[in-house]
Image (cartoon, rainbow, N blue to C red):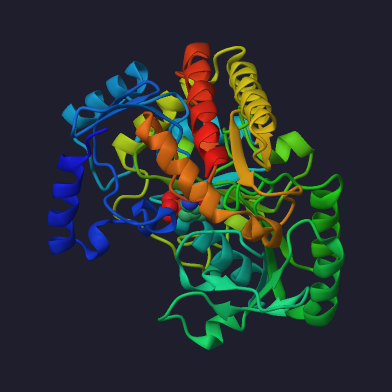
Amino acid sequence: MDFSTSEALHREALEHIVGGVNSPSRAYKAVGGGAPVYMERAEGAYFWDVDGNKYIDYLGAYGPIITGHAHPHIAKAISHAATNGVLYGTPTKLENEFAKMLKQSIPSLEKVRFVNSGTEAVMTTVRVARAYTNRTKIIKFAGCYHGHFDAVLVEAGSGPATLGTPDSAGIPESVAQDVITVPFNNIEALKQALDIWEDQIAAVLVEPIVGNFGIVEPKEGFLQAVNELTHQAGALVIYDEVITAFRFTYGSAQQLYDVEPDMTAMGKIIGGGLPIGAYGGKKDIMEQVAPLGPAYQAGTMAGNPASMAAGIACLEVLQEEGLYEKLDQLGKKLEAGILEKARQYEIPLSVNRLCGALTVYFGEGEITNYDQAEASDGESFATFFRLMLEQGINLAPSKYEAWFLTIAHTEQDIDDTIHAVEKAFQQMQLK
Ligand code: PMP
């Protein structure tokens, strides 16, 4: 495959844009470096790059794209918004309509607010929880990504329940000291943290299904125990459903496990591909937010008509009967194909899958927490990534990311992908 135009664009980008990319995850740092592929057009399950190569896409723009690219219903809504004026700075009817749609599909949302990104949504839930409880510390789970604001760019030290250390330059130790990190799926560690810092914890922040060290489901009873222990300590449970909302069912992960958080942050899918975030929760908690309450959050672009229209159109598409069953069928077929070829070519790996999202981890053993995901074989992943790319299969360039299926993927796409997987494994076996 010829990538020469991508390479030229990357050389140019390096002159003007830091690292050549506007988000570090787009760089190919974890898969051996070099120029990332520059895409030019996307439709349905496919990408075409600037060199004319075609790909089956499993990146799904890191989660938002579930209807397939350029879905006609969403495209029409966005075009209509564009010709109607994209930004008013006044309230619009669309905001009410979309807020009602979200509330109907996620019962724990009594009141919502729209913002512009997942980061903003989670950031504000943390602020509101602190305002509501009058406490400062939060607990998060190791390896979970919640956006790039200071309080959550914090990692664990060693030990089951540890005060965080900054995961980025520019974050003061004092901020990190307000964050306690515990391993996912480890209720004892959470209990220990809550015992130690009980009356200081404002909230426990949790991705109900992890999406950022691959797809990792909560063990049975884990989310229920999180709720019980957190509430006993007088703290709030915040779900980060930026990836999970509308990914696995029409609604949120909380419905899948029959648990309700106090607050929920959303993003990605609910914008139909345009910038969006939203947060919501119990009425008395949400009423801490300005102009009703003392917790401030604002935004020039928040609730803009284009994002609202795209989000509404996206959810309308997702209401189609049998859609998540279709994603599950496709996901199941892809998982089975990968596992079969791995057995055939003696490539040790495991697949974590839920519905139309999966992660392939190279190496032995199951993956239920970050330490295990971290220990998975990144070199094999990098080799696999390149071999797939060369065959026109676009994956996220990191061993920690998920493959996201869309309703535009066909059985034929899955067959073609499994064929490419087989060829990749054949070559990996020879090495
Ligand atoms: N939370 C989770 C679970 C995410 O996966 C992400 C983005 N990958 C974010 C928050 C941040 O969202 P955004 O990139 O829209 O700011």
Q: Looking at the picture, how far across and down is residue 47, in whole percent?
A: 31, 28
The N terminus lies in which quarter of the figure?
Answer: top left
Q: Looking at the picture, how far across and down is residue 200, in whole percent?
A: 73, 79
Q: Nearer the viewer, residue 285 or 390?
A: 390
Q: Nearer the viewer, residue 102 or 399?
A: 399
Q: Nearer the viewer, residue 24 or 260?
A: 24
Residue 314 occupies quadrant: top left
On screen, residue 60 above or below 407? below
Q: Looking at the picture, how far across and down is residue 20, in whole percent?
A: 23, 58
Q: How many marks?
A: 0
Judge from the rendering whether residue 221 lies leftward or rightward of residue 106; answer left or right.
right
Judge from the rendering whether residue 125 lies leftward or rightward of residue 205; answer left or right.
left
Whether residue 233 can be seen here: no
Identified at 82% across, 51% down, the residue is 222
Residue 102 occupies quadrant: top right
Identified at 87% across, 47% down, the residue is 221
Whether residue 422 can be seen here: yes
Identified at 64% across, 37% down, the residue is 252
On screen, residue 398 above or below 346? below
Judge from the rendering whether residue 276 lies leftward or rightward of residue 177; answer left or right.
left
Judge from the rendering whether residue 344 lies leftward or rightward of residue 66; answer left or right.
right
Q: Looking at the picture, how far across and down is residue 4, in whole percent?
A: 17, 41
On screen, residue 229 above or below 160? above
Identified at 40% across, 23% down, the residue is 45
